[in-house]
Amino acid sequence: MEDFQDIYEKEKEEDVVEKILLVDDDKFDRAFITDLLAPKNFSIDQAENGDQALALLSGKKYDLLLSDIYMPGITGIEMIQKIREVDANLQIILFTGHADLATAIEAVKLGVYDYIVKPFDPEDLIWRVDQALEKSRQVKLDLDARVELVERVNAQSERIRLIFYEAVQTLVNAIEAKDQYTKGHSIRVTQYAMWYAKHSEIPFEEASDIQLAARLHDIGKLGIADAILNKTGTLTDEEYNIIKKHPVTSYKILKPIMNDSILKTIRYHHERWDGKGYPDGLAGDLVPVGARIVCLADSFDAMTSFRSYKKAMTLDQAIEEIERCAGTQFDPGIVPGFVEAVRLNREQEELLTTVG
């Protein structure tokens, strides 16, 4: 009985057996080449024409293709052209009994490893097969190294992104800690934006960008003096202009790490549908959809939150104000869905509170 080590070694050897596809319409040539390579213990599949070969290649990976050029149906060159559309790295040796320069040049253009004229020397064929398989191994090692490098770079990038995001989250908390009246503002804005995104079935990737932008939209306020942020009276023109800079400041802080969609949502979340917003005075569809959604969510939270200088609006009052501003401050195409999403989720919250 084979012990575990024997079975392991046997399976290991089977895993590294190199696979060859032999294509030739002459069954005697196929038998001769197969017998010639038998001592090498390769795994050899056979096909008698190009169509059969393509069918085998569609379901299995090979290390080397050995093929005649002139066969019934598609030629070896036509077969390779189709192969190269999906596999640029398969090593190929062509052989033919009718050599011509034009065919040889075309084979080179298609990345054929070798071109052999029949009748060939058996030992020479074995040597060329060994060389082609060595090239195949090297290509695989190079590809594996590239994949590993890309995976490492991606993993490192993701770690850096997470570290940066955690740092930004800390800054968001620091901003909200500066003003007791805006504590939790970013979380609520994110929640309202996601209510709308789910209700409107916005695609996951787009919704994820909006979610992150909503959470970080006010990061630029970190550089604004507490005296301005916490001022209970009317802001002067100079103070208001300082406040208006925060979307651009947020954009600059996050630019090294966030994608373009998130950055644009953050930069333009105070733009208006009628073009009277800031920082760039964009109007209508020029304002990114994510920014229009965050603008609505941001305004709704401001309306329904208590401030030292105003009372919080009721849900109905806030909705009435939003509907009144549809077409001026807010995108009239988004307002109905936002209002419906807010009503549905608020009703669910009240129901859960009652049941609890």
Image: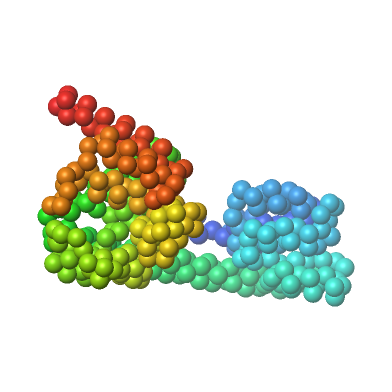
Question: Image check: 295 left or right of 327?
Answer: left
Along the line of sight, which residue is nearer the eye, 145 or 192? 192
Along the line of sight, which residue is nearer the eye, 37 or 277? 277
Residue, x 22% and y 67% (percent of image)?
Answer: 236
Image height of 245 relative to 205, above or below: below
Image height of 65 relative to 333, above or below: below
Residue 322: name its quadrant.
Answer: top left
Along the line of sight, which residue is nearer the eye, 346 or 210? 346
Residue, x 29% and y 45% (percent of image)?
Answer: 300
Q: What is the quadrant of the N terminus in the image?
A: top left
Residue at the top extreme of this rendering: 355
Is residue 201 visible in the rendered image? The answer is yes
**Total count of labels:** 0
Question: Image check: 63 left or right of 13?
Answer: right
| Image coords of residue 18 (percent x, y) | 57, 60
Q: What is the quadrant of the C terminus in the image?
A: top left
| Image coords of residue 272 (percent x, y) | 40, 55
Residue, x 22% and y 51% (percent of image)?
Answer: 185
Along the line of sight, which residue is nearer the eye, 24 or 279? 279
Residue 110: name its quadrant.
Answer: bottom right
Q: How is the image coloured?
A: rainbow
Residue 112: name its quadrant.
Answer: bottom right
| Image coords of residue 21 (percent x, y) | 67, 56
Question: Image check: 192 left or right of 84?
Answer: left
| Image coords of residue 318 (percent x, y) | 28, 40
Is residue 207 visible in the rendered image? The answer is no
Question: Image check: 221 left or right of 138?
Answer: left
Residue, x 12% and y 55% (percent of image)?
Answer: 180
